[in-house]
Image (cartoon, coloured by chain):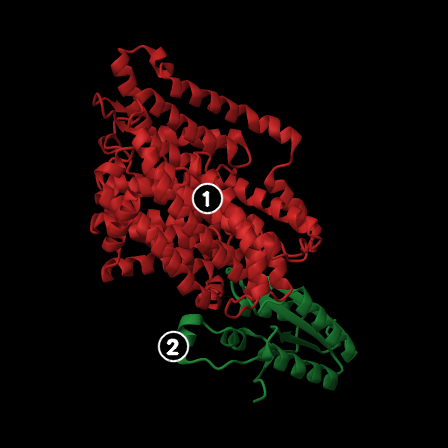
């Protein structure tokens, strides 16, 4: 039932995630649609700051419920963060994916890979890449 | 004081630029492996055993000593900042330490752990300086039967008193003893358990066993549990503490040292019991003073157990140096390194290799100072290590593991053995068998057999010679008490581990970080 426009937001508890979320909520409001927030991790290190803890998750849901939109928060763990976002986009037949973009040097990208690149190349719908202000 | 003079000689041989460099490397490496749960000083020393082929014994042992103490210290950092005790000895530190960190007092918790470790490690090492030579001079007189009994004591203590299940401990011990038997009988030249394989008849190299069980076993285990919900590390600046904190800490430090050292020095080994005792003592004292912050992050609950932990680590050098008896995995691997140099561990060590022993003791004191100097400012850097993805980390470990196993004899067959032993290590972790009794069995088994043969040769094959000495009889009585007592005590009182678990349940823990057993 994709009568309602669905905006998927790749979110992490940092400035990039916030920028993507703000824009995603704005887009959903413009289109009268709903927001699906994805927070994913590779789960292969002891500590991953981009994977929200309970407290940050609670703050996120508070923020979202204040927006008055229909929202859904999903967390997942898998080999590739980009693939997890794409899987959710597929699952909810997203109309738009919003991601936060970080600056990364060519060497850094070679070493670390790029979640954004993977989503841009792999998504079936439009992808909106935003950068945090400043 | 003769001992002090010898210790000064030790300092003289350690305080060269080259040896100081090895001390720094050891301390940094030890903290590195200590911070990361799952890998510990025993694995680090095992992976570094091949360097002994090219390094002077003194330099190698200076580095190993640094790794040993550094590992102890690193474990407390993880316990405090992540509530993941890197090793069983840090379980008690994690209880109050993590609550302090959550209450925004991480810097003070780290500081009291670091300074407490320093105080306890220094006092403990000085006690080793005075006790070990005295014990060694007595121990030289000990006959083969009593010596054999002492080894039985060490094995039984490590197997049944430490760890949760005596049955699992004994399974691991006998696995180790069996591995130690493989190959040519050193007395008669008969080949045992070698399945007609000439390569097995050469005996299995200790390096291959240690690296296989510690490094490969752990790597396979981690690979089987690769993805786990990540935790959040509590951000921390440079550790510091106020005068009030210091005032509350020094009592627990000294009491913790008093608990820890005897437990380490007796072949009862292990830091679990003294850290537990220190924790409940500090809790009682705090309650009596009417300042019971236990449960909300009491600094006494970090200072005491952390001091006990390090004092017992220092104490384990008494049986290691005076009797050649290791009671922790790390000291067992260090004993293997001694053997690699062709040095016979035992009561004669102090008189045969005084230079090495005193340099080692001096380097323990220096390592302690280095730990304090380097690690107080470096704490935030160590916390960053927890972000290393497991695949990269273990790829590196596997590389060094394979290199070390191959370098031992330069034969590809050892890599095959390494894989088999790695699978054994994986199975042991799967079925919660402790690793320490196995390593002890592999390393002490042949030494024990040697003493047994010696006793039998003297008595002409009469078995009763084994209890012909009074000391041997006393030790066997202690052994039988040690075997029976845990069963009796367990009925009367809960074990430290279950108390820790209960206390953990009390707190509002929602994250599913597991307490990983790490051998030290």
Does residue A37 appear left or right of residue B82 in this picture?
right
Q: Position of residue B278 (x, y in %)?
A: 57, 45
Q: Residue at x 31, y 26 (%)?
A: B193
Residue neighbourhood size for the residue with mark 2, other residues' Cα within 10 Å, grouped as few (<14), some (14–19), many (≥20):
few
Q: Which residue is drawn at 35% across and 34% down?
A: B135
Q: Which of B469 and A80 is in front in this view?
A: B469
Q: Nearer the viewer, residue B34 or B295?
A: B295
Q: Is residue B451 depicted above or below B266 in this figure?
A: above
Image disc number at residue A106: none
Q: Do labels 1 and 2 share a chain?
A: no
Q: Which residue is drawn at 68% across and 67% down?
A: A55
Q: Where is residue B197 in the image (x, y as percent from the top left)?
A: 25, 30
Q: Name the residue under label 2.
A: A107
Q: Which of A133 and B195 is in front in this view?
A: A133
Image disc number at residue B312: 1
Numbered label tally: 2
Quadrant where the N terminus of chain B is found in the figure: top left
Residue neighbourhood size for the residue with mark 1, other residues' Cα within 10 Å, grouped as few (<14), some (14–19), many (≥20):
many
Callout 1 secondary element: helix
Tell me the subunit letter for badge 2.
A
Q: Is residue B428 depicted above or below A19 in this figure?
A: above
Q: Is residue B47 depicted above or below B457 in this figure?
A: below
Tell me the colour chain B is drawn in. red
Disc 1 and disc 2: Cα gap in Å? Answer: 47 Å
Tell me the colour chain A is drawn in. green
Q: Residue at x 34, y 56 (%)?
A: B366
């Amino acid at each position: 039932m994709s009568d309602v426009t669905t905006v998927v937001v790749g979110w992490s508890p940092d400035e990039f995630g916030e920028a993507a979320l703000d824009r995603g909520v704005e887009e959903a409001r413009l289109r009268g649609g709903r927001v699906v927030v994805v927070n994913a991790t590779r789960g292969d290190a002891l500590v991953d700051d981009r994977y929200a803890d309970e407290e940050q998750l609670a703050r996120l849901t508070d923020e979202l419920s204040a927006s008055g939109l229909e929202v859904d928060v999903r967390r997942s763990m898998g080999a590739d963060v980009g693939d997890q976002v794409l899987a959710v986009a597929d699952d909810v037949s997203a109309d738009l994916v919003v991601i936060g973009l970080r600056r990364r040097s060519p060497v850094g990208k070679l070493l670390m890979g790029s979640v954004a690149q993977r989503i841009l190349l792999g998504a079936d719908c439009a992808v909106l890449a935003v950068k945090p202000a400043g | 004081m003769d001992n002090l003079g010898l210790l000064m000689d030790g300092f003289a041989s350690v305080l060269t630029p080259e040896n100081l460099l090895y001390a720094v490397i050891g301390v940094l490496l030890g903290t590195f492996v200590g911070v990361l749960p799952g890998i510990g000083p025993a694995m680090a020393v095992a992976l570094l055993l091949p360097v002994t082929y090219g390094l002077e014994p003194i330099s190698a042992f200076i580095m190993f000593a640094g790794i040993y103490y550094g590992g102890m210290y690193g474990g407390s950092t993880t316990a405090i900042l992540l509530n993941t005790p890197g090793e069983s000895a840090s379980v008690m530190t994690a209880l109050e330490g993590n609550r302090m960190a959550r209450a925004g007092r991480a810097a003070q918790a780290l500081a009291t752990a670091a300074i407490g470790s320093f105080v306890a490690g220094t006092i403990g090492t000085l006690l080793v300086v005075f006790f070990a030579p005295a014990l060694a001079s007595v121990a030289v007189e000990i006959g083969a039967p009593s010596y054999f009994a002492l080894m039985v004591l060490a094995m039984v203590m490590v197997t049944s008193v430490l760890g949760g299940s005596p049955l699992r401990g004994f399974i691991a011990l006998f696995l180790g003893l069996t591995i130690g038997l493989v190959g040519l009988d050193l007395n008669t030249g008969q080949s045992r358990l070698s399945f007609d394989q000439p390569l097995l008849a050469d005996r299995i190299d200790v390096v291959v066993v240690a690296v296989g069980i510690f490094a490969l076993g752990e790597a396979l285990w981690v690979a089987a549990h690769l993805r786990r919900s990540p935790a959040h590390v509590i951000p921390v600046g440079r550790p510091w503490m106020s005068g009030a904190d210091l005032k509350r800490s020094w009592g627990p430090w000294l009491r913790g040292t008093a608990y820890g050292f005897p437990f380490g020095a007796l072949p009862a080994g292990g830091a679990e019991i003294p850290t537990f005792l220190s924790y409940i003592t500090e809790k009682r004292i705090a309650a009596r003073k009417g300042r019971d912050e236990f449960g909300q992050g009491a600094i006494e609950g970090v200072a005491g157990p952390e001091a006990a932990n390090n004092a017992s680590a220092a104490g384990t050098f008494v049986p290691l140096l005076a009797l050649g008896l290791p009671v922790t995995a790390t000291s067992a691997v260090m004993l293997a390194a001694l053997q690699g140099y062709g040095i016979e561990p035992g009561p004669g060590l102090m008189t045969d290799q005084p230079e090495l022993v005193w340099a080692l003791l001096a380097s323990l004191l220096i390592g302690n100072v280095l730990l304090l100097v380097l690690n107080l400012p470096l704490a935030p850097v160590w916390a960053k290590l927890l972000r290393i993805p497991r695949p990269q980390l273990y790829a590196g470990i596997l590389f060094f593991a394979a290199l070390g196993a191959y370098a031992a004899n330069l034969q590809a067959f050892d890599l095959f053995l390494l894989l088999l032993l790695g699978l054994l290590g994986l199975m042991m972790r799967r079925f919660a068998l402790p690793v320490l009794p196995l390593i002890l069995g592999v390393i002490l088994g042949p030494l024990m057999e040697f003493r047994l043969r010696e006793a039998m040769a003297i008595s002409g094959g009469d078995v009763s010679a084994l209890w012909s000495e009074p000391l041997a009889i006393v030790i066997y009585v202690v052994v039988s008490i040690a075997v029976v007592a845990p069963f009796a005590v367990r009925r009367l009182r809960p074990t430290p581990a279950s108390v820790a678990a209960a206390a953990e349940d009390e707190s509002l823990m929602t994250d599913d970080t597991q307490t990983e057993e790490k051998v030290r």
